[in-house]
Amino acid sequence: MTFATLGLIEPLLRSLEKLGYQTPTPVQAQAIPAVLAGRDLMAAAQTGTGKTAGFALPLLQLLAMEGPKVAANSVRALILVPTRELAEQVHEAVRQYAENLPLRTYAVYGGVSINPQMMKLRGGVDLLVATPGRLLDLFRQKALKFNQLQTLVLDEADRMLDLGFSEELSNIYRALPKKRQTLLFSATFSDDIRLLAGQMLDDPLTVEVSPRNVAANTVKQWIVTVDKKRKAELFVHLMRKNKWKQVLVFAKTRNGVDALVEKLQGLGVNADGIHGDKPQATRQRALDRFKLSEVQILVATDVAARGLDIEDLPLVINFDLPIVAEDYIHRIGRTGRAGATGEAISLVCADEVNMLSAIEMLTRQTLKRQNEPDFEPEHRVPDTDASGQVIKKPKKPKKPKASGGGGKRNLGKWVDSGETQAPEPSVKPVRKVPVFNTGPRKRKP
Ligand code: AMP
């Protein structure tokens, strides 16, 4: 199969040739003809499967072949994404695909001045990539109108709900024309997303190119158990021992990112961090330098790292496990992209056992454990498996009391005894599913 047989026009084929895309990926093979035919789409695809081209190529073709010239302050196709970085990345891909087409494309997101964005929108934009908050700001300030909108794409829709964008999504929906084509893309599909899709999509084609919620099998994954307080030390030890060259590290909190970066920089390691508290320009610079291998270790929170496409990234480290199990799949999807092999190592402490168990259940695998000599944890991480069970070893039988009363209770060795906290429960943020108008929607003819 080739891109030409999928019905793509010559200007797009030329761009793809320049980019070196030879064969459509499975998600592209299914999505491109369906989108060209005007169908609504609900697509679950692993990260790194080429889903961006799967929606962007046919969308650009429809915009180039059909419809009126874009009017002032109008937009004909809208791609909503959860983060600024993803907006930049998707727009960069769109720009490359659209190189030979007379279309105007643009990306808007928060964290940067709104005025240049308002100026740019004056002339109208055929395809706009946007984060929900900034899009609404622009709409409310009358810099944007949606009456020409023919297609809406929700990229990483599950993440938008996770990040609490449900309110913004509802408000955006209310402002959109009812007749439109809607494409919903997500690396993972939770039940909330399926519910949302039921409200938003009109007779959608469902595309699922990999089993639900299974991480890319090109990524070798294992965990190293360690005490919480020794994680940074273990990280440095493994980095030196294995001579890691380019590593993306995920930490749970902004403070966690800063602390690890500071420690690494203090040891003379070329490290930088990205998280939501840092200005957009600083985040982008750190990312660009990491991509150019000018930064060796990039430490990030989930929000900042979402959807980053870094070619040939060999290694992802989970310094902390993610609170939401689906994020594990997104994180390790940064490596092993487009068929390359990669490694994902998680440093797991006893507090994280429930998160580990949730990840194993979601990915339907028991992660291999490797102990690092001299770093065996004092607080043992209980065994887990893909059934979602934390396997508790039976308590040792009580010794018969020599004399009445006062004997010390034997709590068994496997659990954290009184000297440490019990493992945290795995907290899943409550996701509000927005309620949208459910009237009939058809793409404008
Ligand atoms: P995505 O899943 O959209 O983030 O894409 C992952 C990576 O695969 C990106 O670097 C794309 O440029 C690349 N890619 C997408 N489709 C193809 C293809 N058909 N052939 C080769 N590379 C591709």
Image: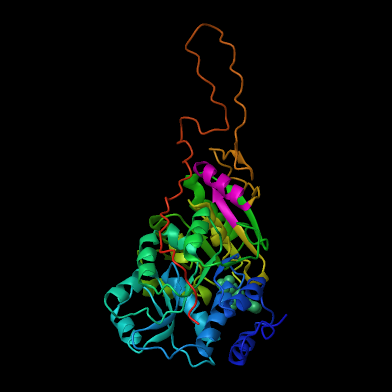
Residue furthest right as drawn: 1
Q: Is residue 387 visible?
A: yes
Q: Position of residue 368 (x, y in %)?
A: 66, 49
Q: Is residue 410 left or right of residue 30?
A: left
In magenta stretch: residue 362 = yes
Count up the numbered dots. Answer: 0
In magenta stretch: residue 212 = no
Magenta residues, as a range?
Answer: 345-363
Q: Residue at x 48, y 60 (%)?
A: 196
Q: Main secondary structure of the magenta part?
A: helix
Q: Position of residue 1 (x, y in %)?
A: 73, 80
Query: Quarter of the image holding residue 243?
Result: bottom right
Q: Position of residue 420 (x, y in %)?
A: 46, 35
Ligand 1 lies in quarter: bottom right
Q: Residue at x 39, y 65 (%)?
A: 169
Is the residue 48 above or below the residue 262 in the image?
below
Residue furthest front as drawn: 440
Q: Residue at x 28, y 73 (%)?
A: 140
Q: Position of residue 206 (x, y in %)?
A: 60, 65
Residue furthest left as drawn: 141
Q: Residue at x 61, y 77 (%)?
A: 32
Query: Quarter of the image holding residue 132?
Result: bottom left
